[in-house]
Image (spheres, rainbow, N blue to C red):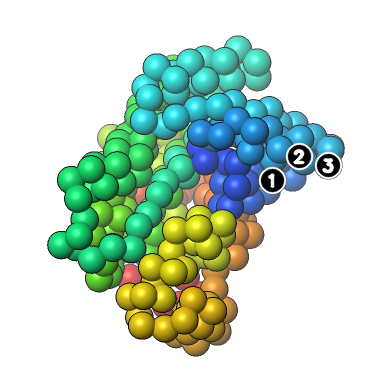
């Protein structure tokens, strides 16, 4: 098992990509802290992992609330020991014309996606630095490398995450800590179903049921990214197999983005 006895924290672990990563880490032997703004969702994922023979527990946590993040991290360390792997996955997105994006919406997206990642990195590093080891994975996006219309706030936050990732990778490489970013393409998770399909359909002037076939048709592989695609990439980057990889923003997009 590539992550045997590692202590892994995943924010936004109650569904979608976060839940897939939690399950994959547990399968590889990690003790998984499933954290989420919705404690019930986090507990459901943790219970599924335990039922399958893995080690997991749930914590309710708002990634924008520093005392809450610090408190959860202290509780996790008290239970299992210092954190070895921290995944900043929690995030939100909106498809909205730029001129309709309000100050409040801009601030919300940047606060959760970028500031939440900033707080998570600082809290994780506080546990990793004394031991001179650890891995941080930050969830960016293909929208963190190439801008897209009606995604201004989301793109700004995800570009920022890549810059943050590169900066931390440079600063802490000689402390034994690796920091990388994941850049998935479109993944049809509950987040996409709830927040994007209708807005994207309006943007492209198509019925909602046409959105997925349209996006699949644009992809060189002819399919969209699956949560498992992201989870297995995260396992690789978290493991010793990726010991010489840091500061990278890894595309998981089926060839739709190649830079």
Vertical arrangement, residue 88 with respect to residue 231, above or below: above
In the displayed image of the protein, which residue is found farthest to the left? 99
Disc 3 designates what residue? 52
Q: Looking at the figure, which quarter contains the C terminus? A: bottom left
Q: Is residue 178 left or right of residue 35?
A: left
CB under 8 Å between callouts 3 and 2? yes
Q: Looking at this view, is 133 or 102 the one in front?
A: 102
Numbered label attached to residue 146: none
* Mark 2 or mark 1: whose residue is earlier in sequence: 1
Residue 34, image x, y percentages? 61, 34
CB under 8 Å between callouts 3 and 1? yes
| Residue at x-position 35% and y-position 80% | 204
The quarter of the picture where residue 33 lies is: top right
Query: Element type at marker 2?
Result: helix
Disc 2 designates what residue? 49
Disc 1 designates what residue? 23
């Amino acid at each position: 098992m590539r992550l045997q006895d590692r202590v892994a924290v995943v924010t936004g672990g109650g569904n979608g990509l976060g839940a897939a990563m939690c399950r994959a880490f547990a399968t590889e032997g990690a003790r998984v802290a499933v954290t989420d703004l919705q404690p019930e969702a986090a507990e459901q994922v943790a219970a599924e992992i335990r039922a399958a023979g893995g080690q997991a527990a749930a914590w309710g946590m708002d990634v924008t609330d520093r005392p809450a993040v610090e408190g959860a991290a202290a509780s996790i360390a008290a239970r299992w020991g210092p954190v070895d792997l921290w995944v900043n996955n929690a995030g939100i997105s909106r498809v909205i014309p730029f001129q309709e994006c309000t100050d409040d919406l801009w601030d919300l997206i940047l606060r959760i996606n970028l500031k939440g990642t900033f707080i998570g990195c600082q809290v994780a590093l506080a546990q990793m630095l004394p031991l001179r080891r650890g891995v941080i994975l930050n969830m960016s996006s293909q929208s963190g490398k190439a801008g897209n219309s009606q995604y201004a706030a989301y793109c700004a936050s995800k570009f920022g995450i890549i810059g943050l990732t590169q900066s931390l990778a440079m600063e802490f490489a000689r402390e034994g800590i690796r920091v990388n970013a994941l850049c998935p393409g479109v993944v049809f998770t509950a987040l996409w179903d709830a927040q994007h399909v209708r807005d994207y359909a309006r943007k492209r002037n198509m019925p909602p049921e046409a959105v997925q076939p349209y996006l699949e048709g644009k992809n060189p592989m002819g399919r969209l990214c699956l949560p498992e695609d992201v989870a297995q990439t995260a396992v690789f980057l978290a493991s010793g197999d990726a010991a010489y990889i840091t500061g990278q923003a890894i595309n998981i997009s089926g060839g739709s983005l190649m830079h």
